[in-house]
Image (tube, helix red, strand yellow):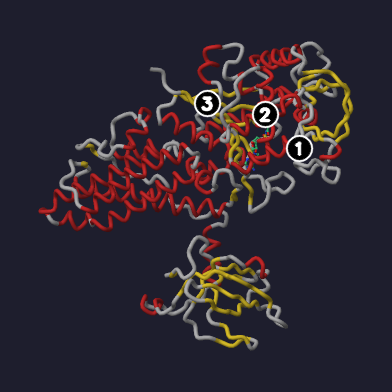
Amino acid sequence: MDKKTFYISTPIYYPSDRLHIGHAYCTTIADAVARYKRLAGFDVFFLTGSDEHGQKIQRKAQQNNITPLEYVDHIVASFKKLWTKLNISHDDFIRTTDQRHHEVVQAIFQKIYDQGDIYKASYEGWYCTPCETFWTERQLVDGKCPDCGRPVELLGEESYFFRMSKYQDRLLTFIEDNPDFIQPVSRRNEMINFIKSGLEDLCVSRTTFDWGIPVPFDTKHVVYVWFDALTNYITAAGYLHDKEKFAKYWPADIHLVGKEIVRFHSIIWPIILMALGVELPKKVYGHGWLVVEGDKMSKSKGNVIDPLELIDEFGADSIRYFLLREITLGMDGNFSREALINRINADLANDLGNLLHRTLNMINRFNGGLIETPGAVEEVDTALIDLAQRTAADYEILMENMDINGAIKEVWALISRTNKYIDETGPWALAKDPAKKERLQTVLYNLAETLRIVAILISPFMPFTSPKIWQQLGIRSDFGKVTLQDGQSWGGLPAGTKVAKPEPIFPRIEDKGEPAAAAEDKTEKSVPAVPEITIDEFAKMDLRVAKVLAAEKVKNADKLLLLTVDLGTEQRSIVSGIAKHYAPEELVGQHVVMIVNLKPAKIRGIESRGMVLAASSDDKLTLVTAKDMLPGSKVK
Ligand code: MSP
């Protein structure tokens, strides 16, 4: 029987500039899904590419005194380099300057014209070149582009128009009948409202520049860049030139796109397909934006993050892991160097790296490097084995629902549990007692077997790391042939396997943003030696998570705020000297850490019962928070 097929695409990127970390985010998601589907046994077609025509590119080339093709060739080479370094497993890379694409765009333009759905008319409208989009006067916001806020130009030309209005009702019915077509739901609702407000016919040709695909029957005109670009999804799948391939992969399963271009993919694209009589894709998924310290990336702000530099510094798998773990699909997410380093150190070096290192070390030291047949199973083993099997089963459900973030969290819960299993079973003690030999074999087997499963489950996210774990575990079979099923069945690790010497897979990162020596100096100067205390002395402090319910300024005291906090079992009032650093409304809802058993004090006539904790240096101050913890949780 033929394998089930799966077709996923990324947007094709404009080669007007080098790609940044936001673009890498989108392609990494698509790659993780494509790799997962291959693991699950699908015949996958994963497409990416470049969107090379249009006024924006033509102008860039002019500014650089080269031809548009020379300009894009150079930038497209940098795209391909990035995808290789990031280990992106696309099956095809389409360029809209490819001959195959040129032919398809001209053929479909002709067909739609011949059937009367493209017509000629004169037109005047406001054009945003960076977005390659026409707007009506009514749609502008303060006279600027409603999408990007940049200035627009009034353009008037005789153009060809695509009769979108004719398909409005059919499209609406399709979207309403196919609730999964646009995801997430919030974007679906937005699109429904947009369509209901009335679709206008779309201007699909231009005469003011010539860097595009000529309209076949009127070569003064070039095809509008979005009409050209969207067509890439069927060109690459073989439309009009490879019938068999097209029948195999089309309709696409997922067009993964950024939230701001969902409109093009769920309105213009489906209508082009309807006009052609071609089936619609199954899903358009709009992911959120990656922002930097809360701000949109832009050259003018100087906050554009180059993914190649990050890969060189931290390694591709660390970057991939961060992007997939930190940001919930569909939501905007923040990139910061600090958050990246925290994730690498906590999740990769500590949790995963240590588990592998400890396990291999013990197998080498206590058992001459051999993984032996496990013996009788105890309760603690059953708990681990059950969790490993449940994780692998849940993982499949989560990945099928595009909940990549959720799937990673589950795998990391298994990793944490396995680290705890080492402490619970104490292999070092078992190794000292010859009578416990069989028990030791069982524990070591269970550890290595869990790592085998983990290596399989993380392979869509970290494709460089999984084969390394495989090799260190000493498994001889080819990792490239592994299936999801192999990761879902306990006991796949053959007894008698000889492990390799452990090599750290994720060394801890000391932030080089600031040279280490300088950082040490500063610490020494600013933190005076305080006498040591015992753990018992420390335990006298009752530190708890508290939720701020209300905050207000204290009259006639410009440094003080009065906070009302919830401790789970009671509410308290606290006077805190943080008014210079926080506005009251910023604090409400935050989960802060406070010392609860501090002797009450009267400040400006108000009784303050407790104190919130903050880190401070010079004139900076940040509250210590515990975002996901319930009020009253103990901090120790
Ligand atoms: N060429 C069009 C797409 C045509 S698809 C038929 C285009 N190109 S783009 O290069 O401007 O953007 C490509 C994709 O990158 C979009 O999906 C966009 O959302 C995504 N991103 C650009 N900046 C981004 C972030 N900062 N964060 C996440 N994705 C972002 O639009």
Q: Quadrant of ligand 1?
A: top right
Q: CA distance from mark 2 to mark 1?
A: 13 Å
The N terminus - image quarter: top left
Q: Is residue 308 visible?
A: no
Point out the tag, 2 or 1, that comes first from the N-terminus. 2
* 54 on left or right of 21: right
Q: Residue at x 44, y 77 (%)?
A: 542
Residue on which the image places disc 1: 197
Residue on which the image places disc 3: 7
Q: Secondary structure at mark 1?
A: loop
The amino acid at mark 1 is Ser
Give the answer, above or below, for where 252 lies relative to 557. above
The amino acid at mark 3 is Tyr
* 511 on left or right of 387: right
Callout in the foreground (3, 2): 2
Point out the tag, 3 or 1, that comes first from the N-terminus. 3
The disc label shown at residue 171, or none: 2
Callout in the foreground (3, 1): 1
Q: CA distance from mark 3 to mark 2?
A: 22 Å
- Name the spot of residue 83 as percent of width and height, x first: 55, 32
The answer to whether the residues at label 2 and label 1 have Cβ atoms under 8 Å apart is no
The answer to whether the residues at label 3 and label 1 have Cβ atoms under 8 Å apart is no
Question: Within the image, what quadrant is residue 475 found in?
Answer: top left
- Name the spot of residue 212 as percent of width and height, x first: 75, 21
Point out the tag, 3 or 2, that comes first from the N-terminus. 3
The answer to whether the residues at label 3 and label 2 have Cβ atoms under 8 Å apart is no
Question: Within the image, what quadrant is residue 465 found in?
Answer: top left
- Name the spot of residue 424 as percent of width and height, x first: 26, 58
- Name the spot of residue 573 as percent of width and height, x first: 57, 79
